[in-house]
Image (cartoon, coloured by chain):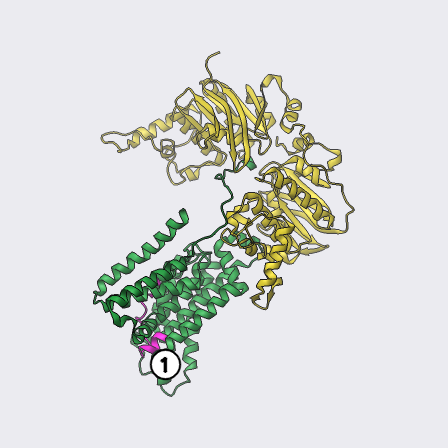
Chain colours: A yellow, B green
Amino acid sequence: MPDPVLEVIDISKSFWGIQALRGVSLNVHAGEIHAVTGENGAGKSTLMKIVAGQERADTGRLHFRGRAIAMIHQELLPFPELSVAENIFMGQEPTRWLPGWVDKAARDRQAREVLAQLGVNIDPRRAMRELTVAEKQSVEIAKALARRADLLIMDEPTSALSEREAELLLRIIFDLKRRGVAILYISHRMPEIFRLADTITVMRDGRLVATRPAAELDADRLIPLMVGRALGPASRTPGAHGEIVLEARGLGRPPRFHDVSFSLRRGEVLGLAGLMGAGRTDIGAAIFGLAPATAGTILVHGRAVGVRSPAAAFAHGIAMVTEDRTEFGFVPDMSVKENVTLSSLGRFSLGPFIRRRVEARAADEQMIRFDVRAAGRGQPVKSLSGGNQQKVAIARALLADPEILILDEPTRGIDVGAKAEIHGLIAGLARAGKAILLISSEMEEVLALSDRVLVMREGCVAAELVPAATSPDEILRYAMPG
Amino acid sequence: MQCQAETVHPPRVDRKPHTRWPAELTLAIAIAILMAALSVLRPNFLNLANLVNLLRQISINGILAVGVTYVLLTGGVDLSLGSVVAFSGVAAASFAHPGQYPAVVPVLIGIAAGAACGAANGLVVTRGRVAPFIATLGMMTAARGLALLLSGGMPVSNLASSFTRIGGGSAAGVPVPILIFAVVAVLSWILLSQMRVGRYIYAVGGNENAARASGLDVRSIKMVGYTLCGGLGGLAGVVLASRITTGQPNAGIGYELDAIAAVVIGGTSLNGGTGGVGGAILGALLIGIINNGLDLLNVSSYYQQVVKGLIIVGAVWLDRSKQRT
């Protein structure tokens, strides 16, 4: 066998204390389609970013025997106002007469040739913004070809494509393989993986679990490798549930999610599982009024309520701890105290004036209750660790004393210790009678903490499961598209 | 789709407890040094008369600086203040002719005219989603036009002495404009540091999305900021018209930038969320002392402009480099 085009040797990488990759090694050969799969957060994208040079590994080595590496991102990053040809040759335009004098005729001709090689029919003079997603992707691939890339990294390339477009893309990928291009292909989609891949690598928790020839694997053997058998947090003993507090009927905001109905009782934890982009966060954002639903009804205590803004949600006893902490979770320059009391300042005021001593006492109590580790209540939240920032966000939501609490990825990017604390907190809140909607990509978390689990797939509820009677494998099977 | 836990963050470590050197302190020290230097070069600088004169000179810019602080704290900007000063001055003067109304009427009309301009800015920004720079740039032109329309392009003169005493008179030996500035400063400090709405203004400027997700009514809070800013512009217009005893439709050109300069020198971020009244006052004071001092030193006003420009940039530069370390 000839030398591999790419050798990844013992790569490790951590982000603020969290080990994203642990000693990963793999080889990719010319003309090989190497699929990399695994759950959300397994480390696939980090690995790809390191290979593409967008991130630096902490330890380990990379050997690349080729001319160029190209990466096709999930979210394409073209220059929308420039033409197709300008995009393809960005930064390496053919020139004549003078350095920097672009030979437009040659550029457009070469662009047409490259696109023709891919078997796509796009006028290179068209503006990029006029193209469909599939066409843009073809242009990105053409860009890689024009740069004579020997290694092409594709991150979930078919996720935004229709079936017919995806079919066309797969054909292009086979064609590239025949030309000897090595392809690293990240995907969740079983049918695609088995059709395309020569080799399959499975990642889990930053580790490479297995690299096997595709012929040796099928879905039944692959899924257990992805999910693993590692036990998560001890499961919560389901408590007695009270009356229905929250109900969603036919809720939707196309194209993000459609026709979602469920009910949630006092003291109950309803898990929302599914892959990224399945619409889980959108459901939470709709109930909380951050991105209101365009169809269906939300009922609180059996009464239909319009939730057009988070302010309205708070008024109905709904609070949310958002997934995107830095964007929605806190005001970075404000102190721990000011952040914690921001949603319930009215309670600590006399008319329009803040009762500073009462406010300070409430903030101190929340800091103790949620074990926020800061130099004091006056420390700006931007200087806290991720776990403590998350606790501040949770403390703020709970100080408003909501009946219904939506938690979106409450333990993302948090170290193991803080994670266990937050799990304990969630169980305690349910015992105290809160109705909790728990959105999480971590299957162990959802299974351990929920009374029921809704599995989302491509914007729809694919299944409702009971943790005691299901397994990560089953959830994943419902969550997988295709 | 993208793997969630892999969102790339810069490595982050818990920093030492945050002990930011307050910009106000730097400024106060700079002002002290400057005053010491000036008193050595020109002993009459420290005359009570000169100091009172200095405060009177900065009172209008000071009121405007406090006003624009509200808007800058929300992360916006107000370029219309100079025109609002002219419009509200003309509006007030139109009701201030002798024997017409008691002085309180033109004063309230001037403030209301300014507040209306501010509220219009706020509406365009919050409902129309027009960038604050553009919205208030439009108001800058429109309010100037209103001032010219209302006055027929001519200064509105022949004002009642009860009105002109606001800008020209004294109470207990202190010029009235200084008293007005002091009251504005104290009330604004109370609003921003002791009241809920003040906290909300900081939250909106510090992270608008988080403020919204915390259940704050971001639009109303911004409206408060723009309206207060416009109202204080109106008040400054009244003081100016009273002091120069005419409603001048061409008054106040460039005042908005002097006010923003004072606020920025005082450490308020143009991105919103940090700063306050104290900085605005010190900034206005610093600019005033430099103008006054250079006057005493017989430096040409052309040089004064250059110096002021250097100080604006220098102050922010200093502040930035401190934050980076």
Asked whether A23 or A115 is in front, the reply is A23
Asked whether B213 or B23 is in front, the reply is B23
Identify the image quadrant of residue B268: bottom left
Q: Residue A165 lies in magenta, yes or no?
A: no
Left or right: residue A37 versus residue B224 is right
Give the residue drawn at x 58%, y 40%. Answer: A414
> From what the image shows, is residue B38 above or below residue B49?
above
Which quadrant: the N terminus of chain B?
top right
- Chain under disc 1: B
User: Residue lying furthest front in this view?
Assistant: B40
> From what the image shows, is residue A424 above or below residue A52?
below
Q: How many marks?
A: 1
Q: Residue B244 lies in magenta, yes or no?
A: yes
Q: Residue A372: x, y in percent?
A: 60, 48
Q: Residue B102: x, y in percent?
A: 42, 85
Q: Residue A411: x, y in percent?
A: 61, 41
Give the residue drawn at x 74%, y 48%. Answer: A431
Q: Secondary structure at mark 1?
A: loop
Left or right: residue A96 versus residue A241 is left
> What span is in magenta?
B239-257
Q: Residues within 10 Å of mark 1 (few under 14, many from 20)?
A: few
Q: Which residue has dot 1 on it?
A: B173
Asked whether A433 or A455 is in front, the reply is A433
Identify the image quadrant of residue A347: bottom right
Q: Residue B100: x, y in percent?
A: 39, 86
